[in-house]
Image: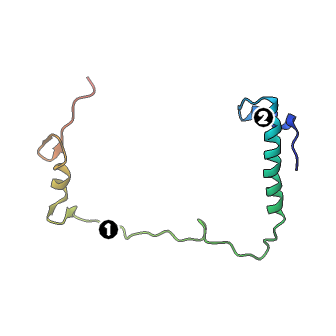
Amino acid sequence: MSLDTRTVRRIAKLARIGIDDAEAEGLARELGGILGWVEQLNEVEIAGVPPMIGTGLAAPRTREDVVTDGTVTGGACREAVLSNAPDRVEAFFTVPKVVE
């Protein structure tokens, strides 16, 4: 399929791309080639071909949703997390006041 430069300029305007006449001619050839490939793909017979595994057929890998006590190896999870805090008060992070 071939596109004329008028159609290419309209497509460029819709895409908000500024092109000149020389670019429109080159783009017309390139877009025509792309549309030719799409037409070739439309000729492929796909009736009876089973789909490949995709998002609709694959089962998601899930883990069991269990409640834990929040501990990690060697101690409590709270202490491991709070050990990274630059400043803390008891079991809480302290942050600078941002609202007056």
Coordinates of residue 12 in the picture (x, y in percent): 76, 34
* 67 relative position to 52: left or right: left
Q: Quadrant of the C terminus?
A: top left
Q: Secondary structure at mark 1?
A: loop
Mark 2 sits on what residue? 23
Disc 1 residue type (three-letter): Val
Residue plotted at (83% across, 37% down)? 25
Give the quarter of the image for residue 37. bottom right
Which residue is at the front of the view, 90 or 53? Answer: 53
34 vs 72, nearest the viewer: 34
For this orientation, the residue located farthest to the left is 90
Residue tagged by mark 1? Answer: 66
Q: Amino acid at mark 2?
A: Glu
Tell me if residue 51 comes above or below residue 80 in the rendering: below
99 on left or right of 13: left
Q: Which residue is pictured at 74% across the width and 75% down the height? A: 49
Spatial CA span between label 2 and label 1? 61 Å
Residue at point 77%, 77% (across, down): 48
Relative to residue 72, is residue 34 depicted above or below?
above
